[in-house]
Amino acid sequence: MSALRDALRDLPETVFADLLESDDAYLLVIDLPGATAETVDVRISAGRLEIEARREKDLPTEFRYVEEERALFLDAELPLPPDATGADAEGTVDRGVLELRLPKAGAKPETSIPIEDAEA
């Protein structure tokens, strides 16, 4: 699990993430302001968690950027703990917060994790 913890520290400073663990699963919580279930893609492949997220920015026409720090895209590839699996993984997005529940057990070679809006 330390490889995942270290990889989370390497995310851009503007990305906030928490990693939690129980006896049977890991819970990864990532703040992705403006992202929705339709704009987030999560895959597990070869022991790695791949997260792609995008969001829209609404810029009022009477304004221009003086400074722009909020990224439109997040592409992250994180190592999974050896006992984590993509089988039966679940993901939700609620008001820009992505929660991934990754069960512990034997992993499938590649798995796409469906992401749902929590409000649905």
Image: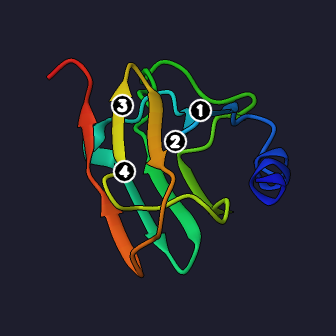
Image location of residue 62, percent across then percent down: 47, 18
Q: CA distance from mark 3 to mark 2?
A: 18 Å
Which of the two discs, 4 and 1, labels the residue nearer the N terminus? 1
Residue for point 81% across, 37% down: 13
Looking at this view, is 16 or 22 the one in front? 22
Could you tell me if the residues under marks 1 and 2 are in contact, i.e. CB atoms within 8 Å?
yes
Could you tell me if the residues under marks 4 and 3 are in contact, i.e. CB atoms within 8 Å?
no
Q: Nearer the viewer, mark 3 or mark 2?
A: 2
Left or right, residue 54 beside residue 70:
left
Left or right, residue 3 beside residue 43:
right
Q: CA distance from mark 3 to mark 1?
A: 21 Å
Which of the two discs, 2 and 4, labels the residue nearer the N terminus? 2
Q: Which residue is identified by label 2?
A: 25
Dot 3 alpha-carbon crowd within 10 angstroms: few under 14, some 14 to 19, many 20 or more = many
Q: Which residue is identified by label 3?
A: 93
Residue for point 63% across, 61% down: 80
Which of the two discs, 3 and 1, labels the residue nearer the N terminus? 1
Image location of residue 32, percent across then percent down: 52, 33
Q: Secondary structure at mark 4?
A: loop
Q: Nearer the viewer, mark 3 or mark 1?
A: 1
Q: CA distance from mark 4 to mark 3?
A: 14 Å
Image location of residue 31, percent across then percent down: 57, 29
Could you tell me if the residues under marks 2 and 4 are in contact, i.e. CB atoms within 8 Å?
no
Left or right, residue 10 beside residue 23:
right
Looking at this view, is 109 or 104 the one in front? 104
Q: Quick check: 87 above or below 70? A: below
Q: Amino acid at mark 1?
A: Ser
Could you tell me if the residues under marks 3 and 1 are in contact, i.e. CB atoms within 8 Å?
no
**Residue 22, numbered circle:** 1
**Residue 89, numbered circle:** 4
* Residue 49 in which image quadrant: bottom right
The C terminus - image quarter: top left
